[in-house]
Structure formats: structure tokens, C-alpha cells
Image (cartoon, helix red, strand yellow):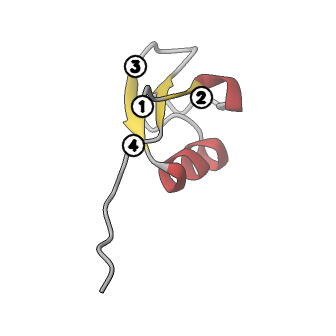
Amino acid sequence: MSATTTTDDYEFTCSQCGEGFAANGGMRAAVLERGCPICGSPVSADAFDPCPA
């Protein structure tokens, strides 16, 4: 039996509005595709930093 856990792998900070949050891989992909969920600005991969282990 395997357990599925959700971990936050990235820390996102929007370069336009300055808001940030922890994100997993799926959230990162969605934000890169759709833009900042707070202000709608386009987002680049540079807006994501790996979370410390």
C-alpha cells in the first residue's frame, strides 16, 4: 500500500504584485500557463524558488 502526500516543492513570488505562496509541481505548471492567480500577470520560471528541504 502506498500513501500519497502533497508536498510544496516551490516558493512562488510574483514579480508584479509581490504576493507569494508555496506550490507543488502541478500548481507551478498551472501558474506558468495561466499567470499569477492574484493579479493575472504573466509568470516566468524565475518566479519559483525551490523550497528548502
Mark 1 or mark 3: which comes first in sequence? 3
Which residue is identified by label 4? 8
Residue 52's place in the image compared with 25, above or below, is above
Q: Is residue 11 left or right of residue 49?
A: left
Mark 3 or mark 2: which comes first in sequence? 3
Image depth: mark 1 or mark 3 in front: 1
Mark 1 or mark 2: which comes first in sequence? 2
Image depth: mark 1 or mark 4 in front: 1
Which residue is identified by label 2? 41
Q: Residue at x 60, y 24 (%)?
A: 47
Is the C-beta separation of discs 3 and 2 under 8 Å?
no
Q: Position of residue 27 (x, y in %)?
A: 48, 50
Let me know if residue 44 appears in the view: no
Quarter in which the N terminus is drawn: bottom left
As measured in the structure, the alpha-carbon distance from the residue carrying label 3 to the one carrying label 4 is: 17 Å
Mark 3 or mark 4: which comes first in sequence? 4
As measured in the structure, the alpha-carbon distance from the residue carrying label 4 to the one carrying label 2 is: 22 Å
